[in-house]
Image (spheres, grey):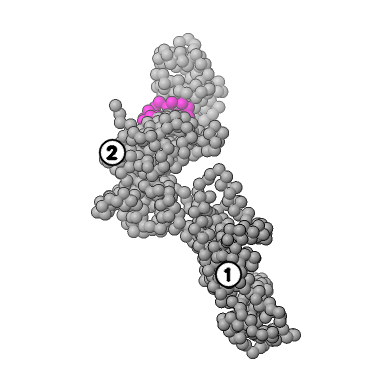
């Protein structure tokens, strides 16, 4: 059996009276295994920080329970939960040096001075802040403060490490370097961590599992690969992935051994019935109206298929993003070579059945991914 | 780049001079009066040319007031000490009660907190006499009339709302996450209050204390009604100079100079601190 470190059971958060105030977190159920790194991913105001703060004890849980390391903690004050946290706003103590900020909790726990020093040195080296240890927080840059705040959390022997947007202020190069180091640091020590971020690359690079949140609801909780390949619903499908998934409303019908997906503007995508498993066919056809989604890197050009007209062509240095008018909407393609296309050019694009994600238009839930049922 | 025209500069200088004259004239005049006898003060027309004398100050310090009707005993130095003691003690008690209360109002949003905070502030709106009459009766019944404890208690009506509202703004300005970071590192909220919130709100607490001290020092009516001669501060003690043989303007002036000297010096010394402190706390809406 997996060793569960954190168990969030049906937790709600209301700002204001329960049932009346703003319902920021809605019935979240989540388990985090010991030694696992989880990313809470979502846009601003989706409830991810509220969830994190309820786990830390800074916000009261309106409904539900939280268990941490086998203890029921949702009624305990932060001091008794044994969690460490790196704050989005850094929140360093301005009156003491960066070194003392990092060592604060270890000193409070009365660890021997030599151990405190060696641990501060290790974490500072890992985060490249050794040179600012004796400076005061107000005299160092935002990125350095952020790393000091991260160091202050990571240095602790807590049951759970909560990292709220821990790398938002860092330069891209440093961010890439530190992602690897931080993951190694956490894994090597067997720490359990929850990372809150709106940066998908960060979530993909660091997390074993990603919890996608929107409007206070946990949309999907799965590995980065599964979220990308098998999005549970339209939100996850379009939120995760850069550029976002292309989606088109369609009505499905069958004719002469072919499944027809009728898009807006009279565009029809035709697939032999045999391309889809019988249960997928059944599920799609029984609904009639569906939404189809396809990731930009899975949209192929010049292989027959439907016509589209180029509206933009951007070379980003390592890939091309092409936007084209398609089915009274826009389809975005990603190619790895520079495309010699101008605005107004006509191209033909193909959407392979393996790459199609089909969603229910009413509930937004996934019906099928490629040839199999969701 | 200097965009101020010469005319504008002259007008500005003129305006500032008028304002300075308007505000400084009474202080300078009182200062000059304190070195004159009643005769030179009351001559018509008044003049800034006179033979300075220290008799007014001597009378205050020795406690013997020479009037046309004879020598009067006055307790000015005692009054000065009373002012110092009452103001200091009131501010100390005010800080002791007001700072934790301000923290509670700033940080812990509990039911009715705004109402309680506003009620405390509303003490400042009521005319003091409204409170004084019933208070005098109560104080006499419970033995607090004409005691330092009673006066310090009543002075809380002046200092407590002031400290509470100024310091509260400071606590609200400290990002709550700094305190959370400390608490999550294994400290109680009380320790967080002591080690994080108090030092960070230090300048605001000092500014509020200073302002409260000045307000307490300048109070007149509470001590006038609730204290007898030996407990009265300088503001009330100055009434002794209104004698049967007329008002002793010279001594009044010297008394005023001596009584405003501590707060004046304090305000001058801490002027920048005070302005910065008060405006910082007011920034956040």
- Magenta-span inclusion, residue A40: no
Residue interval drawn in magenta: A222-238
- Placement of B181 over or under A371, stated as above or below: below
Q: Residue at x 61, y 72 (%)?
A: B229
Which of B24/B164 is in front? Answer: B164
Residue nearest the observer in this picture, A302 or A195? A195
User: Residue under circle 2?
Assistant: A190
Q: Chain of mark 2?
A: A
Q: Which of the image's four quarters has the N terminus of chain A?
A: top left
Work out which quarter of the rendered image holds the C terminus of chain A and state it: top left
Question: Would residue B211 be visible to someone looking at this image?
Answer: no
Q: Helix, strand, or loop for circle 1?
A: helix
Foreground tag (2 vs 1)? 1
Name the foreground residue: A150 vs A324: A150
User: Residue A65: where, in percent of width, then height?
Assistant: 42, 32
Name the secondary structure under disc 2.
Answer: loop
Inter-mark Cα distance, 2 to 1: 70 Å
Give how far across and how far down residue A108 sits, in percent: 33, 51
Q: Which residue is mark 1?
A: B231
Mark 2 near mark 1, Cβ–Cβ under 8 Å?
Answer: no
Q: Residue at x 52, y 53 (%)?
A: B102
């Amino acid at each position: 059996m997996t060793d569960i470190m954190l168990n969030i059971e049906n937790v709600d958060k209301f700002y204001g009276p329960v049932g009346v105030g703003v319902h920021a977190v809605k019935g979240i159920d989540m388990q985090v295994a010991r030694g696992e790194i989880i990313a809470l991913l979502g846009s601003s105001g989706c409830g991810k920080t509220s969830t994190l703060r309820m786990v830390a004890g800074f916000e009261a849980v309106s409904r539900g329970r939280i268990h941490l390391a086998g203890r029921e903690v949702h009624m305990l004050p932060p001091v008794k939960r044994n969690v460490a946290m790196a704050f989005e706003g850094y929140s360093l103590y301005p009156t003491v040096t960066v070194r003392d900020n990092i060592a604060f909790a270890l000193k409070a726990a009365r660890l021997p001075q030599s151990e405190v020093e060696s641990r501060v040195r290790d974490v500072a080296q890992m985060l490249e802040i050794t040179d600012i240890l004796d400076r005061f927080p107000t005299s160092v840059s935002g990125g350095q403060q952020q790393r000091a705040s991260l160091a202050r959390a990571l240095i602790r022997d807590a049951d759970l490490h909560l990292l709220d947007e821990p790398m938002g202020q860092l330069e891209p190069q440093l961010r890439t370097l530190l992602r690897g180091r931080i993951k190694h640091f956490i894994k090597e020590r067997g720490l359990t961590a929850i990372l809150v971020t709106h940066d998908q690359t960060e979530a993909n690079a660091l997390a074993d599992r990603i919890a996608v949140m929107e409007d206070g609801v946990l949309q999907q909780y799965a590995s980065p690969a599964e979220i990308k390949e098998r999005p549970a619903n339209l939100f996850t499908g379009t939120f995760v992935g850069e550029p976002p998934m292309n989606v088109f409303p369609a009505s499905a019908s069958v004719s002469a051994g072919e499944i027809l997906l009728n898009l807006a503007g009279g565009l029809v995508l035709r697939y032999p019935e045999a391309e889809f498993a019988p249960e997928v066919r059944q599920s799609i056809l029984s609904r009639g109206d569906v939404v189809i989604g396809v990731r930009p890197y899975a949209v192929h050009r010049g292989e027959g298929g439907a016509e589209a007209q180029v509206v933009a062509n951007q070379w980003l240095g390592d890939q091309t993003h092409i936007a084209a008018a398609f089915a009274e909407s826009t389809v975005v393609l990603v190619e790895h070579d520079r495309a010699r296309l101008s605005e107004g050019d006509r191209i033909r694009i193909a959407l392979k059945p393996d790459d199609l994600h089909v969603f229910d238009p009413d509930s937004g839930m996934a019906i099928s991914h490629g040839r199999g049922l969701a | 780049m200097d965009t101020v025209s010469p005319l504008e500069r002259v007008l500005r200088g003129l305006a500032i001079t008028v304002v300075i004259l308007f505000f400084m004239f009474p202080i300078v005049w009182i200062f000059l009066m304190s070195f004159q006898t009643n005769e030179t003060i009351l001559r018509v027309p008044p003049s800034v040319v006179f033979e300075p004398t220290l008799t007014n100050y001597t009378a205050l310090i020795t406690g013997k007031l020479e009037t046309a009707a004879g020598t009067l005993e006055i307790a000015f130095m005692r009054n000065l000490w009373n002012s110092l003691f009452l103001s200091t003690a009131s501010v100390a008690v005010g800080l002791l009660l007001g700072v934790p209360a301000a923290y509670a109002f700033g940080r812990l949003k509990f039911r009715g907190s705004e109402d309680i905070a506003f009620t405390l502030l509303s003490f400042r709106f009521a005319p003091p006499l409204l409170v004084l009459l019933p208070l005098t009766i109560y104080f006499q019944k419970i033995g607090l009339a004409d005691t330092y404890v009673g006066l310090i208690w009543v002075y809380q009506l002046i200092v407590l709302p002031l400290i509470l509202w100024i310091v509260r703004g400071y606590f609200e300005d400290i990002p709550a996450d700094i305190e959370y970071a400390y608490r999550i590192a294994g400290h109680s909220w009380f320790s967080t209050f002591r080690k994080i919130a108090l030092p960070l709100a230090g300048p605001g607490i000092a500014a509020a204390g200073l302002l409260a001290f000045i307000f307490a020092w300048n109070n007149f009516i509470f001590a006038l009604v609730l204290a007898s001669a030996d407990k009265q501060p300088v503001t009330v003690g100055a009434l002794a100079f209104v004698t049967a043989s007329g008002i002793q303007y010279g001594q009044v002036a010297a008394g005023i100079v001596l009584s405003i000297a501590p707060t004046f010096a304090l305000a001058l010394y801490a002027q920048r601190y005070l302005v910065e402190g008060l405006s910082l706390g007011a920034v956040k809406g």
